[in-house]
C-alpha cells in the first residue's frame, strides 16, 4: 500500500471503531482511534499471519495489551477479511464473539485475554521466549501498549526480562496518546520519558509521530532490523484522533462518540478496504527430545521425604518423557526443587528471577504457543501474581502452578514466607484444580496427572519431610481422595490434606487406643472434591472435622461444602485451621500453636465424641 | 565516630548477626554481613530516631526491605541499646520478638513487615509521602534494599512514584552483593545497570564501595543534600563479607555459618560498642482541618443510586469530619468515585496512576504513620495487590480498601473487569473485615463504620444503580445483617448481599404471590457474619440458599458456614453463584445467565419448597 492507502486504512479502522461502539452503546472508540494508524501499517505491511491457521508456529503474534481498544482489533479483523460488518456490529452483545475486551476463548486469533493493564507485554515476552529459545522460528511478536499502563510494575519486569533474554523478536508499540481514563498521564506527550526507561533496561527505542504512516512504516522496518535487543516504538498520538469533538480531549474515555454519524462523516465516511495480510514463511519447529516413557520417582513407604523434593524429581522425569514440558521459577529453584528439572533440561528451564508476575505471564505466553509450563515459587509469593492467574483463567490457559513452603509448618521463617491464603486464592479461580499431596508418591503421581487437565492447576507442596504412606503404584486423580482409617463405628470423620494428614493419622491411632474410632480422609484434591466419599462419610459418621494448615476461610474447610450444597442434609461440621498470626517457631511448635496438630485433633474429637459443641 | 570506630561497629553487627543465626540454627547471616557497614554508618551518623518515642512524627524512618537480613536489624537495635544480648540470642524462637522477618506487631521500631521482596521501597514511598505532602516534617526515610529484589516490578512502581512526587526525603540503599538465593543476580556487581534504571525514572544516584565507611558516609551526606528528587545509593558489597568460608560464595544463602565460633574470631571477636543514635529535631505536625462532625449523605428510599456513588460521597464527608482521612486511587477515580473526595480534599488525595501494588503500599506506609487511608480501584484489579494486602495484614496495618465494579452485574465490559474473586481474597486475609452493601444509605454508614475497625477492611461496591431500601438513619455494623423478609411459615432462607439482595426481594415477592413464603437476609457483613441471625434462620427454616455475584468458592456461600462450624446441626444448603465464564452482555442478561437473578432464585426456591434436591 502507498502512503495514501495506508492513511485511508487508518481512517477505516477509526470509522469501524466508532461504528462498533455506537452499535454497542459502550466501549472505547477514542482509545482505538489513537492507535489506528499504528495498526493499519502493521497489518498492511509487517504482520505475517495466516488467519486460517492461527496455531501456525511461524505466524507473527499480535497482542493488544491495551485490551479496551478492542474495537480497533475487531476493525482490523474485518479489514483482514476474517469477520464481516454484521458481526462487527454485534460488539459487546450477549453471545457475540466480540467482547468488550478480547479473549482467546471466543476468537482464535487472540493470543491472550487482556483488559487488566500491564499484562500484554509480559505475556508477549513469554511468547517471544518460545520463538527465541524453544522453537527458533523468525516469528515476531508485536505488542500494542497504552501509555497509562507504563505505570504498572509488571511492564518493567517484562522490559527487564526481554532485554536480558535478547528478545529481538519482540516489538512494543506504545500508543502515547497522553490521556488516561480520568485525565492526563504522568508524562503526557514526553516520549523521551518512556524512551529513557526502556533504554535503561536495555531496549532499542524509536520515537515517532503515530499518525505519520510513512514514519511508522520506517519505525517497524527499523525494529525488524534491530538485532540482539527488543525494540520499543514510542508513538506520539492523539486520543480520538480525527474527530474534533473528542480529539485530545479529557472526559472522552470509554464511551461512544457523542454523534457517531457526524464523526463517521468527519472521518470521510465508511470504506471497505481489504488488506491481504502476509503469510508466514514455511517453518519446521522441532520439539526437544522426549522418551515418551514416564518414569516417575518411586519412594518406599516409611521413608521421610519432602513433597517439594518429590515434585522436583517428578517434574524432571516428566520433562524427560515429554518434550513439551517447560519449567519456570522465581529464583528459588533450590527451595521449590525445580533445580532438578533445570539440571536435566536446561534448555527448557526459565529462570525468572524474583518477578512472579512475569513468571506467570511467561507461562501464559508459552501455554498460548502449545507448551506445557510448570511455574513454581513459594506459595505465599504466588499471591503476587493473582491478577495474572485470574487473566490466564479468562484466556483458558493451561498452566501448572506449584507453590512450596505451605503453611505454618515451614517453621522459623515466619508469616511472610508462609502460604496461608493460597488455597482460597486458587479455589476461587474459574475452572481451576487445586491439589495438596501429603507424601512423595502421591506428589509424583499428581505432578504427572496435572499435565492433562484443563485450566489453572495448582499443586501445593511442603517444606519439611514427611513419611511416605502410599506405595509407588497407588493411583491419584483430580477429584479423588483416600480413606485412610475407616470402620463401622467411626464416631466422626477427620478430613485432612498435606501435612495435617499425618497429624490426623497420629490422632486416630491415639484415639483408637482410647476406644474412640474415627475415620480419616486424605482430601488431596481440594478442588474438585471427592463428593461421593465426603457424602458417605457425612452420612455414616454424622460429623466432619476439617484440619488444614491454611487460614480458615476459603480453604479445605470451605471446600468440603461442595459435597453438600444441593439441598441434601449436611453433617455437623468442625473446622481446625490457622486462626492466629504466627510468629517464628519450630514446625511442631507452629502446628501445635495453630491447633492443627495431632494433640489438637484428638482433643477436638474427644469432645465431639462426648456430644459437645466446639466454641 | 571516626573511620576506625565505624568499621568496628560494622564488624560488631556482623559478629552479632552470625551469633544470632547460630543460636537459632537458621536465618540469613551472609545477607546481613554484606550490609553491615551500610547499617553501621547510618545508625551512628545519620539516622535521627527516638527509640523511646517510635511514634514521634519527626523521627527518621528505617525500612529493611530485604527483610531476611533481620539479624542485622536486631544487631543494630542491640548496638542502639534497646535490646540486650540475651534477647538477641532468642532470634527465631517461639515467643521471641525477634522473628525470622521483622514485623511491627512484635517490635515498635519496625515500620512495616517485610520478607516478601520488593515491598519495602513501595511502603517507604508511602511513608515519605506523609512527610512530604501531609506532615511537612524534615523526617527522612531510609530503605535498605537487596539487589535481587530489583527484579520486582513493584520496585519500579515505587521508583516512578517517588520521583514524580519529588520525594527528596527518601533514600534507597541498595546492597548489591551480587548473589541471590540460588545464585548470581542478573546484573552481578554492575552498579551502573541499577544506576541507569533509577536515573531513567528520575532519581539521583550514587555508586559506592559498600565496605568503605568513609565513602558510605559521604554518600549519605550527598543524599541528604540532594533536593527535588529521591536518591538511590548503589553499594558494591560482598555477601558474607569478612569470613573467608562464606564471603562472595554461592550456596551460602539463608543458613548459619558453617563454623560460627571461628567466624566470630575471624571477625575480631565480640564487641560491645554502644551507639548514641541522634534525636529527631523538635517538630509540630498540624493535622489538616476537620469539623469533627460527620454529615453522611442521606438518600430517600426508592431512589436509584449506585453504591459506588454513595461511597464517594460518604468518603468526602468523612474527610470533612476527620482530618486524618486520606484517599488513594489507581487512576479510576471517576469510576470508583474517589473523585468526590479529591475535589473536596485535594491535599489529602493521592493519585497513584495504574499501579495497584504501589497504591496499597502507599496506604500501608500512611497507616504506619497514623493516617487513615481509603484506597480504591476496580475490585478485579485489587487482585494485583494481593501480596501487599497479605503483608499489610502481617504488619497489623489498618487499611480501608474499596473495590468497585463487582461481579457480572457490571455488564458489557466482560470478565477482565469483573470482580469475581475479591470476596475470597479478602476473606482469607488474617483479621480482615469484608463488607458488601446493597444500597446507598447502607454504603454510607459502612464507609464510616470501617474507619474504626482494626486490620484490613474491604468494602465492595457496584457499578449500576439500585433502589435505596434502607432509611438514612438505619444502623449497620461489621458482623451485622438485616432480615428483610420473615415470617412464621418461611420455607427457606435466601442469604444475599449487594446486587443479589434486590434479586432476592423480587423473588420473595413473586413467591409470596404463589403462597411460598421465604426469609431474606441481607448479609452485608460477609466477614464476620451475623452468626445469631444465620443460626436462627437455619433452625427456623431448615435451609439456606446463598446467592452471590462472585465465583462459588470462597465468597458468601462459604461465609455463612462460619455460623455452623462448632459441631451444631447444619441446615440444608444451596448455593447460587457465578459458575461459568461470562462474556459481554447487559447487566440483567449477565445476572440471568449466571443464575443469580430473581427468576433463578424463585425457580430454586420452588424446587426446594417441593422437597427436591438441586443438582
Image (cartoon, coloured by chain):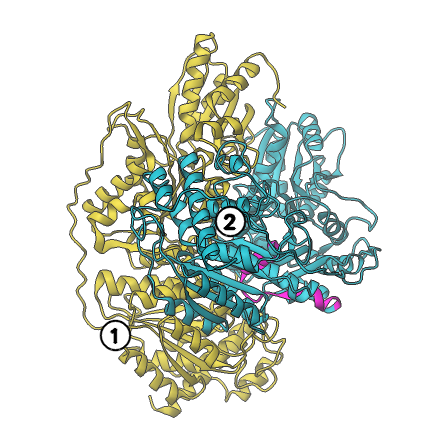
Chain colours: A yellow, B cyan
Residue at point 50%, 50% (across, down): B387
Taking A520 as reference, is A423 above or below it?
below
Q: Position of residue B579 (x, y in %)?
A: 50, 46
Magenta region includes residue A224 = no
User: Residue B20's quadrant in the figure?
Assistant: top left
Residue situated in front as seen by the camera: B563 or B478: B478
Up the image or down, A230 lies above or below B498; here it is below
Image-based side of B266 in relation to B199, left or right: left
Task: Give the numbered dot on residue B117.
Answer: none
> Would residue A435 appear left or right of B598 to someone viewing this image?
left
Percent of width and height locating residue A52:
29, 67
Chain letter of the residue carrying label 1: A
**From what the image shows, is residue A614 above or below residue A157?**
above
In terms of secondary structure, what is the magenta stretch mainly?
Answer: helix
The answer to whether residue A97 is visible is no
Q: Nearer the viewer, mark 1 or mark 2?
A: 2
Q: Residue at x 26, y 25 (%)?
A: A471
Judged from the image, the secondary structure of the residue bearing numbered disc 2 is loop
Q: Which residue is mark 1?
A: A279
Mark 2 Cα shell of 10 Å, populated few (<14), some (14-19), many (≥20): many
Residue at 82% of width from left, 51% of height from top? B472
| Nearer to us in this view, B277 or B371 | B277
Classify residue B234 by image quadrant. Answer: bottom left
How far, Cα to Cα, is label 1 from label 2?
Answer: 51 Å
Mark 1 crowd level (few <14, some 14–19, many ≥20, 10 Å Cα): some
Left or right placement of residue A600 versus residue B463 in this view: left
Disc on res. B114: 2
Q: Which residues are magenta?
A: B344-364
Amino acid at each position: 500500500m502507498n502512503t495514501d492507502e495506508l492513511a485511508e486504512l487508518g481512517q477505516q479502522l477509526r470509522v469501524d471503531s466508532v461504528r462498533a461502539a455506537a452499535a454497542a452503546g459502550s466501549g472505547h472508540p477514542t482509545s482505538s482511534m489513537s492507535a489506528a494508524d499504528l495498526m493499519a501499517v502493521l497489518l498492511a505491511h509487517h504482520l505475517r499471519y495466516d488467519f486460517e491457521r492461527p496455531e501456525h508456529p511461524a505466524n507473527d503474534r499480535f497482542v493488544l495489551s491495551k485490551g479496551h481498544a478492542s474495537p480497533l482489533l475487531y476493525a482490523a479483523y474485518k479489514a483482514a477479511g476474517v469477520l464481516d460488518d454484521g458481526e462487527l456490529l454485534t460488539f459487546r452483545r450477549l453471545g457475540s464473539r466480540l467482547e468488550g475486551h478480547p479473549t482467546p476463548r471466543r476468537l482464535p486469533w487472540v493470543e491472550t485475554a487482556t483488559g487488566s493493564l500491564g499484562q500484554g507485554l509480559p505475556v508477549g515476552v513469554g511468547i517471544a521466549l518460545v520463538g527465541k529459545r524453544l522453537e527458533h522460528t523468525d516469528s515476531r511478536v508485536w505488542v500494542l501498549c497504552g501509555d497509562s499502563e507504563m505505570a504498572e510494575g509488571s511492564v518493567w519486569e517484562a522490559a527487564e526480562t526481554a532485554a536480558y533474554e535478547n528478545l529481538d523478536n519482540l516489538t512494543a508499540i506504545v500508543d502515547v496518546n497522553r490521556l488516561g481514563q480520568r485525565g492526563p498521564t504522568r508524562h503526557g506527550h514526553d516520549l523521551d520519558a518512556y524512551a529513557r526507561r526502556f533504554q535503561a533496561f536495555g531496549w532499542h527505542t524509536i520515537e515517532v509521530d503515530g499518525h505519520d504512516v510513512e514514519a511508522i512504516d520506517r519505525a517497524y522496518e527499523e525494529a525488524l532490523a534491530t538485532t540482539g535487543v527488543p525494540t520499543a516504538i514510542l508513538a506520539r498520538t492523539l486520543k480520538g484522533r480525527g474527530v474534533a469533538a473528542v480529539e485530545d480531549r479529557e472526559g472522552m474515555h470509554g464511551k461512544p462518540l457523542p454523534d457517531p454519524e457526524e464523526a463517521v462523516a468527519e472521518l470521510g465516511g465508511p470504506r471497505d478496504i481489504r488488506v491481504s495480510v502476509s503469510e508466514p514463511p514455511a517453518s519446521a519447529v522441532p520439539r526437544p527430545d522426549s522418551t515418551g516413557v514416564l518414569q516417575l520417582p518411586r519412594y518406599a513407604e516409611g521413608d521421610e521425604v519432602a513433597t517439594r523434593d518429590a515434585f522436583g524429581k517428578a517434574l524432571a522425569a516428566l520433562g524427560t518423557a515429554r518434550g513439551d514440558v517447560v519449567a519456570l521459577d522465581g529464583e528459588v529453584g533450590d527451595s521449590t526443587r525445580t533445580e532438578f528439572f533445570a539440571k536435566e533440561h536446561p534448555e527448557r528451564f526459565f529462570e525468572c528471577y524474583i518477578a512472579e508476575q512475569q513468571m506467570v505471564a511467561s507461562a501464559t505466553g508459552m501455554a498460548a504457543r502449545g507448551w506445557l509450563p510448570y511455574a513454581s515459587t513459594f506459595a505465599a509469593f504466588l499471591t503476587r501474581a493473582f491478577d495474572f492467574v485470574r487473566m490466564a483463567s479468562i484466556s483458558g490457559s493451561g498452566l501448572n502452578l506449584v507453590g512450596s513452603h505451605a503453611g505454618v509448618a515451614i517453621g522459623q521463617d515466619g508469616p511472610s514466607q508462609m502460604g496461608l491464603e493460597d488455597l482460597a486464592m486458587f479455589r476461587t479461580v474459574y475452572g481451576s484444580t487445586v491439589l495438596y499431596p501429603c507424601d512423595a508418591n502421591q506428589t509424583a503421581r499428581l505432578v504427572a496427572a496435572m499435565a492433562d487437565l484443563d485450566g489453572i492447576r495448582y499443586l501445593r507442596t511442603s517444606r519439611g519431610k514427611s513419611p511416605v504412606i502410599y506405595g509407588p503404584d497407588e493411583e491419584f486423580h483430580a477429584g479423588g481422595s483416600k480413606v485412610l482409617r475407616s470402620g463401622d463405628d467411626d464416631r466422626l470423620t477427620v478430613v485432612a490434606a498435606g501435612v495435617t494428614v499425618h497429624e490426623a493419622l497420629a490422632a486416630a491411632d491415639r484415639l483408637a487406643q482410647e476406644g474412640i474410632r474415627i475415620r480419616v480422609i486424605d482430601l488431596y484434591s481440594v478442588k474438585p472434591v471427592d463428593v461421593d466419599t465426603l457424602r458417605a462419610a457425612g452420612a455414616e459418621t454424622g460429623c466432619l472435622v476439617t484440619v488444614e494448615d491454611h487460614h480458615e476461610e476459603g480453604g479445605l474447610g470451605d471446600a468440603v461444602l461442595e459435597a453438600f450444597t444441593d439441598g441434601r442434609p449436611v453433617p455437623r461440621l468442625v473446622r481446625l485451621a490457622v486462626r492466629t498470626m504466627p510468629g517464628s517457631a519450630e514446625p511442631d511448635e507452629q502446628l501445635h500453636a495453630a491447633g492443627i496438630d495431632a494433640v489438637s485433633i484428638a482433643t477436638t474429637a474427644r469432645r465431639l465424641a462426648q456430644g459437645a459443641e466446639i466454641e
